[in-house]
């Protein structure tokens, strides 16, 4: 194939991806646009524009940061998401490794049961979990979310990591065990470095699930300063049928920053792990 045809093919591929890119980025553009508009322009239903017509304003960001408890909500979400993700990934890694490498009678059915557990909607679980939280004396605290979030994160990550551990040859750890390593040493020094891309992927999904959770955060925490972003923003900026769209969109845009940063850093590491794993073989 000539260089010109190859270049034209590459250009055609990127042009074909533009509609999908626009579809993915448009919500963020609209959030940014709404957060920079004045209230008069936001609530003007006679004109629909994809640009700011009456001048940029940062009033909504000022309202969000000074007249609400958004900084506290942001810190609470960050704390809960990081701790819950760490706990969930550790439990999921151990569970996935045990189910794949140390099978027992009924392990296949148990694995399917884990996945079915993930499919149970949170709207059915928050009622019994609220009784558990009350019995443990954790009501109205971030600890209640740290305890309950793994109930839906661990099943998903365990199922995800099981499929990844299944692709790793058993001979790697068998050779280590023959050389005198224990099962724990084989897992820590041999399997985990190879499975690191899968663990990173599970970490990304875990953090995303914990960061965007709403029902548990709205149910288990009542105090304003202790709420997370999802619950606090909705409770403060949606009052009956009145939506404060400017601060809402500013809050949604700022809330997406940690997820974007996490994917930006960890996805690069994930891809490099895949490439290094392919070249080492």
Image (spheres, rainbow, N blue to C red):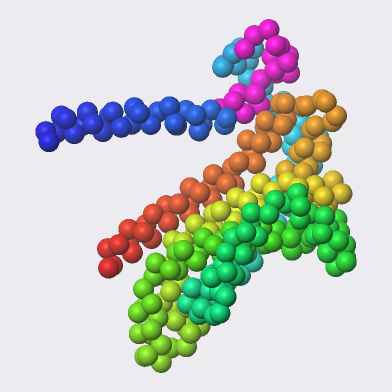
Q: Observer-nearest residue: 74 or 108?
A: 108
Residue 4 picture quarter = top left
* Count of numbered circles in the view: 0
Q: Quadrant of the C terminus?
A: bottom left
Residue 92: % across, % down = 58, 67
In the rendered structure, the answer to whether residue 241 lies left or right of residue 173 reads right
Residue at (60, 54) in percent of width and height: 207
Above or below for 65 versus 110: above
Above or below for 224 versus 36: below
Residue at (51, 31) in percent of width and height: 25
Please say whether residue 46 is one of the residues in the magenta stretch: yes
Q: Observer-nearest residue: 250 or 103?
A: 103
In the rendered structure, the answer to whether residue 231 lies left or right of residue 14 reads right
Please say whether residue 33 is one of the residues in the magenta stretch: yes
Residue 41 picture quarter = top right
Above or below for 55 versus 98: above
- Residue 89 in sight in this render: no
Residue at (59, 13) in percent of width and height: 49
- Residues shaded magenta: 29-48
Residue 166 picture quarter = bottom left
Please, which residue is most extreme toward the top here?
46
Q: Quadrant of the N terminus?
A: top left
Please, which residue is most extreme toward the bottom here?
180
Please, which residue is most extreme toward the left here?
2
Residue 138: % across, % down = 84, 63
Residue 215: % across, % down = 76, 47
- Residue 238 in sight in this render: yes
Q: Observer-nearest residue: 266 or 58?
A: 266
Residue 278: % across, % down = 30, 62
Residue at (57, 75) in percent of width and height: 106
Above or below for 43 versus 32: above
């Amino acid at each position: 194939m000539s260089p010109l045809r190859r270049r034209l093919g590459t250009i055609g591929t990127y042009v074909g991806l533009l509609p999908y890119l626009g579809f993915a980025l448009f919500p963020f553009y609209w959030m940014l646009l709404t957060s920079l508009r004045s209230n008069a322009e936001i609530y003007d239903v006679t004109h629909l524009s994809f640009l700011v017509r009456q001048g940029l304003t940062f009033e909504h960001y000022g309202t969000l940061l000074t007249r609400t408890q958004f900084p506290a909500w942001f810190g609470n979400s960050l704390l809960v998401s990081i701790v819950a993700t760490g706990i969930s990934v550790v439990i999921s890694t151990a569970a996935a490794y045990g189910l794949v490498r140390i099978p027992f009678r009924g392990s296949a059915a148990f694995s399917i049961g884990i996945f079915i557990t993930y499919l149970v909607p949170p709207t059915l679980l928050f009622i019994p979990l609220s009784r558990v939280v009350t019995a443990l004396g954790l009501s109205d605290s971030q600890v209640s979310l740290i305890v309950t979030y793994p109930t839906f994160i661990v099943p998903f990550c365990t199922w995800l990591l099981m499929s990844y551990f299944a692709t790793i040859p058993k001979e790697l750890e068998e050779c280590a065990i023959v050389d005198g390593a224990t099962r724990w040493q084989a897992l820590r020094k041999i399997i985990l470095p190879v499975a690191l891309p899968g663990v990173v992927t599970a970490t990304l999904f875990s953090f995303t699930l914990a960061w965007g959770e709403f029902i548990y955060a709205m149910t288990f925490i009542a105090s304003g300063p202790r709420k997370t972003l999802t619950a606090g923003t909705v409770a403060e900026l949606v009052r009956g049928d009145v939506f404060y769209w400017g601060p809402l969109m500013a809050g949604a845009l700022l809330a997406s920053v940690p997820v974007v940063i996490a994917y930006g850093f960890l996805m690069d590491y994930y891809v490099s792990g895949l490439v290094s794993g392919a070249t080492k073989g």
